Image (cartoon, helix red, strand yellow):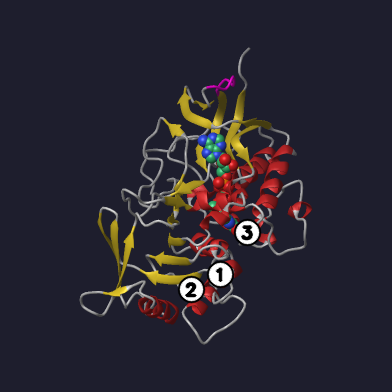
């Protein structure tokens, strides 16, 4: 039997894919959506609350409201609640839904072919236009060492959501990263670990960076900051203080360079990068506790890390990059930003669009829909692969 040709195929069953499907269906197009998992990556937070507030997470035009999925009246849903919201809304839409992982995307005679996992009986899906809303994956760790035990932030979120955080009991956890993931993971491990050291490369400014249109460091990350302050101060006592409560000490240092010889790693912590009172106190106290040494000039600090040390886990939370299936085109990802090359969702390939986190949108409420440019008409030629 002849395979149908869809007006548009959307790959990705997360919030961006859902938003695109709603818009396409509103324009009367014949749509198929393919995803290995429906719900999106925020499901990895499990029963932990998301940083965004409910009103920032609603998908415009979704048939079922987010509040229907929230067990309690809270300002933010949990990761699991939000994934259910996305999944059930997909199920409520009049489109063709295929739960498979897409392996390759090709194009022949102006038609896109989307091939799913080899052991599936599914024929390739065919569409006149294609939207890739396949999200993000963690970047590689900042260094490799023969005996280092690295977890990336996605793996760690999943372990915590599966109730396995106890394996960090009495461990030293070293987290590389300066975003929400680094601060949030520190908080999630604080009831178990012995020491948690957050190593930031760039100092982003620590206090609530709320802006009108997107979340930044919010309450969960602020609790981590509170714990860092209390780890470095014997004068302050309180419910978040580590002293005597079985909670980890949390340290925060900014580094400028990494030197490495096998498993022996030295991080340079210049005083100038650590001049904020919170970082300054954290360095000073870590020095007193024997966790840091002063550099040969005496002005700066150094952290000597043995990557083979037992009872230690290294966590990489240094950012994310676009995740795409294999395609016949090279250069779809901008190597500098790590995200797809697009202009208002249009890729350099006629009829191919990118949406959501893969395009570099860091939060739901800042995403610009790709489907605004998609219509039933044949796609116009887009020119060369030259967009930034
Ligand atoms: C732990 C965590 C917490 C976050 N918290 C927030 C928050 O509070 N607020 C906020 O606005 N943003 C948050 N974000 C950012 C978040 O990633 C995005 O806002 C949102 O999930 C992006 O939606 P998306 O649909 O583009 O990507 P995703 O949610 O990642 O969805 C992509 C979908 O595509 C599927 N997929 C990928 N590759 C393939 C393939 N080859 N074949 C088939 N299917 C595929 C995946 O299974 C997934 O379902 C968070 C991110 C993480 C990692």
Marks 3 and 2 sit apart, C-alpha to C-alpha, by 19 Å
The CB of the residue at mark 3 lies under 8 Å from ligand 1: yes
Q: Is residue 331 above or below residue 305?
A: above
Marks 3 and 1 sit apart, C-alpha to C-alpha, by 22 Å
Residue 37 on image: x %, y %: 61, 38
Residue 303 on image: x %, y %: 32, 68
Magenta segment, prevailing SS (helix, strand or loop) = loop
Residue plotted at (32% across, 50% down): 144
Q: Secondary structure at mark 3?
A: loop
| Contact? badges 3 and 2 (CB < 8 Å) | no
Residue sitting at the far bottom: 235
Residue identifier under label 2: 206
266 relative position to 61: left or right:
left
Marks 2 and 1 sit apart, C-alpha to C-alpha, by 22 Å
Q: Is residue 126 above or below residue 20?
A: above
Residue identifier under label 3: 50
Q: Nearer the viewer, mark 2 or mark 1?
A: 1
- The residue range painted magenta reads 119-124
């Amino acid at each position: 039997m002849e395979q149908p040709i869809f007006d548009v195929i959307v790959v990705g069953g997360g919030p961006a894919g859902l938003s695109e499907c709603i818009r396409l269906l509103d324009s009367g197009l014949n749509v198929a959506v393919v995803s290995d998992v429906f719900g999106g990556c925020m499901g990895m937070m499990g029963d932990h609350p998301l940083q965004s507030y409910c009103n920032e997470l609603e998908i415009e035009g979704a048939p079922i409201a987010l509040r229907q999925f929230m067990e309690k009246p809270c300002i933010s849903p949990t990761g699991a609640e939000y994934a259910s919201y996305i999944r059930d809304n997909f199920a409520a839409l009049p489109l063709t839904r295929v739960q498979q992982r897409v392996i390759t995307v090709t194009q022949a005679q102006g038609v896109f072919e989307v091939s799913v996992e080899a052991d599936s009986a599914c024929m390739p899906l065919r569409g006149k236009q294609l939207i890739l809303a396949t999200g993000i994956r963690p970047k590689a760790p900042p260094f490799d060492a023969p005996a280092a035990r690295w977890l990336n932030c996605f793996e760690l979120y999943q372990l915590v959501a599966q109730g396995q955080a106890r394996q960090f009991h009495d461990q030293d956890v070293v987290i590389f990263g300066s975003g929400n993931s680094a601060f949030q993971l520190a908080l999630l491990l604080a009831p178990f670990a012995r020491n948690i050291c957050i190593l930031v490369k760039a100092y982003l400014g620590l206090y609530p960076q709320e802006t009108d249109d997107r979340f930044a460091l919010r309450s969960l990350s602020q609790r981590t900051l509170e714990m860092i302050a209390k780890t470095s101060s014997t004068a302050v006592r309180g419910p978040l203080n580590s002293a005597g409560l079985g909670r980890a000490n949390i340290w925060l240092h900014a580094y400028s360079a990494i030197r490495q010889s096998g498993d022996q790693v030295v991080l340079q912590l210049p005083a100038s990068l650590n001049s904020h009172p919170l970082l300054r106190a954290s360095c000073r106290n870590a020095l007193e506790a024997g966790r840091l040494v002063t550099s040969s000039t005496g002005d700066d600090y150094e952290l000597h890390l043995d990557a083979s040390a037992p009872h230690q886990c290294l966590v990489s939370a240094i950012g994310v990059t676009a995740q795409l299936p294999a395609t016949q085109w090279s250069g779809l990802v901008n190597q500098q930003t790590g995200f797809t090359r697009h202009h208002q969702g249009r890729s350099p390939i006629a009829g191919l669009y990118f949406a959501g986190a893969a395009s570099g949108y860091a939060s739901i409420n800042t995403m610009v829909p790709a489907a605004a440019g998609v219509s039933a008409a044949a796609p116009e030629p887009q020119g060369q692969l030259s967009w930034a």
